[in-house]
Image (spheres, rainbow, N blue to C red):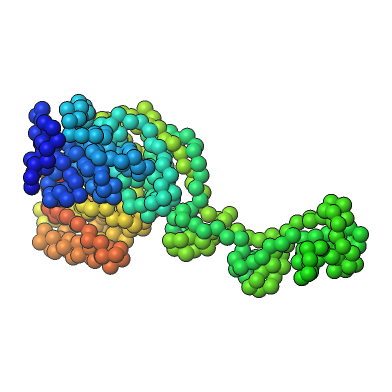
């Protein structure tokens, strides 16, 4: 590719090195795949093609890898546009390559901030995703989640820093994540607006219609009701009209109507259903969802506040200090499991038992579901308990009544398998793994679950806590 010459700043094959920084110039004809761009210090993204720029920006910012989602990105050739993502998720706009020196300071600031980020792995979907959002905000020195009206969003609004991680049709999940963060005292709300969503699928693209209370048809005609004072007759205005002139005549006493308020008035409106002929005063208002087609009486729509959120002190420090979310107690809610504390106590007794009798043995099984959070992103967090209960059932079906199961966190299960030799235990675990993968594949749109397992004999020497810690660390790093 020939060099692009813009005064003294030249990109050769889309690459420019300046002041110890490497820049990659990305335009709609660029040959390189995005996956290979993590090694550059900054991206200069050509926004002549707005749709292209939007797709690229979304690819970077929605990645779960820090070297992509925190990459400094500057727009060039950016026309004025109202796209919220292109406004909020870039690091600046340059009008020519001559301005590249002006980006150096920003790039340095971002990299200093990145070095301060806390990086422990998280155990829940909300923590994992919200930490990512906080990392972006911390490195960009912003404190506010501003909602933008957005026709692409399924709820009509988007919060760019959060929404970029979801598909536009699952925007309601953005509100759920923000509600979670509010409950965790990470953010603080200021009311801005309210939206109404389909109670079935949480979509906000609704068509509101006045409909007949008898047959639900929207095919109805409304007209004024007329009250003729001299004779007391009340009827629809069409009863007073004739085909010849515009004079209104009373159908009962045949007098002409003269002045509204003097000899007649219009006390209300009457509706006539063209479908079932019903005549009625009060119609219903229903909202039909463009997404799932459910027609809902407006009083039953889901109402959600659209707030401007600001980070609290806890939220502002969480990027560097980590998020300590409320403890979840899944074991208490999933039948047939014990919590980690009870599990550790039972394993301690197990160790004592096998120490005293050499023919007894026990195995620990760790089941790590590496991409469980990707699955929840797809099917919704509300399915978590239900799904974990299914997983536990599968494990339970394959072990003996005296064996026991612990849910360490939503992605890790541990099982104690008594008095079985290691080889049979390993075979059994393979069977369980297949069943888990099969369950998810068949029920959730052929989703491929990544299950990693570790089956070892319970050590008689090492403390159980230490063994468990090492086992989980090994398996999580391997996965
Ligand atoms: Zn009707
Ligand atoms: Zn009359
Ligand atoms: Zn719907």
Q: Quadrant of residue 175?
A: top left
Out of 6 and 168, give the one closest to the viewer.
6
Q: Is residue 28 left or right of residue 297?
A: left
Q: Answer whether residue 476 is visible to the viewer in this image.
A: no
Residue 255 place in picture, x, y as percent: 89, 64
Q: From the viewer's perspective, is residue 440 above or below residue 204?
A: below
> What residue is at 71 percent from the left and 62 percent from the top?
223
Residue 401 place in picture, x, y as percent: 27, 61
Out of 53 and 161, give the one closest to the viewer.
53
Q: Answer whether residue 237 is visible to the viewer in this image.
A: yes
> What residue is at 16 percent from the left and 41 percent from the top?
25
> What residue is at 78 percent from the left and 69 percent from the top?
244
Q: From the viewer's perspective, is residue 44 above or below residue 320?
A: below
Residue 156 place in picture, x, y as percent: 44, 49
Out of 414 and 27, give the one closest to the viewer.
27
> What residue is at 39 percent from the left and 30 percent from the top?
312
């Amino acid at each position: 590719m020939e060099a692009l010459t813009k005064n003294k700043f030249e990109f050769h094959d889309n690459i420019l090195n300046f002041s110890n920084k490497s820049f990659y110039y990305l335009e709609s004809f660029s040959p390189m795949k995005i996956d290979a761009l993590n090694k550059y210090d900054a991206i200069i993204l050509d926004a002549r093609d707005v749709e292209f720029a939007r797709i690229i920006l979304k690819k970077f910012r929605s990645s779960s890898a820090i070297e992509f989602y925190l990459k400094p990105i500057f727009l060039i050739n950016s026309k004025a546009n109202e796209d919220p993502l292109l406004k909020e998720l870039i690091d600046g706009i340059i009008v020519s390559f001559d301005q590249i020196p002006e980006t150096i300071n920003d790039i340095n600031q971002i990299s200093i901030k990145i070095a301060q980020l806390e990086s422990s792995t998280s155990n829940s979907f909300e923590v994992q995703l919200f930490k990512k959002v906080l990392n972006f905000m911390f490195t960009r020195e912003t404190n506010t989640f501003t909602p933008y009206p957005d026709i692409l969003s399924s709820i009509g609004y988007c919060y760019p820093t959060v929404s970029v991680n979801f598909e536009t049709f699952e925007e309601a999940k953005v509100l759920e994540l923000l509600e979670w963060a509010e409950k965790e005292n990470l953010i603080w709300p200021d009311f801005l607006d309210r939206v109404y969503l389909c109670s079935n699928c949480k979509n906000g693209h609704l068509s509101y219609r006045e409909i007949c209370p008898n047959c639900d048809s929207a095919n109805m005609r409304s007209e004024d009701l007329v009250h003729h004072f001299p004779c007391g007759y009340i009827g629809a205005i069409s009863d007073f009209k004739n085909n010849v002139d515009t004079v209104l005549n009373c159908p009962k006493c045949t007098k002409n109507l003269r002045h509204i308020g003097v000899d007649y008035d219009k006390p209300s409106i009457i509706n006539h259903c063209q479908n079932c002929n019903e005549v009625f005063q009060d119609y219903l208002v229903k909202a039909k969802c463009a997404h799932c087609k459910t027609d809902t009486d407006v009083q039953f729509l889901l109402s959600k506040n659209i707030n401007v959120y600001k980070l609290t002190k806890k939220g502002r420090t969480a990027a560097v200090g980590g998020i300590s979310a409320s403890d979840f107690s899944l074991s208490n809610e999933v039948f047939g499991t014990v919590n980690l504390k009870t599990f550790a106590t039972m394993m301690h007794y197990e160790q004592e038992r096998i120490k005293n009798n050499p023919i007894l043995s026990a195995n620990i099984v760790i089941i790590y579901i590496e991409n469980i959070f990707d699955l929840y992103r797809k099917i919704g967090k509300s399915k978590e308990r239900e799904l974990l209960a299914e997983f536990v059932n599968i494990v339970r079906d394959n072990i003996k009544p005296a064996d026991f199961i612990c849910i360490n966190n939503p992605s890790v299960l541990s099982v104690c398998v008594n008095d079985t030799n290691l080889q049979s235990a390993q075979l059994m675990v393979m069977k369980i793994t297949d069943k888990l993968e099969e369950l998810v594949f068949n029920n959730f749109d052929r989703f491929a679950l990544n299950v990693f397992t570790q089956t070892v004999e319970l050590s008689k020497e090492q403390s159980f806590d230490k063994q468990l810690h090492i086992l989980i660390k090994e398996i999580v790093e391997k996965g």
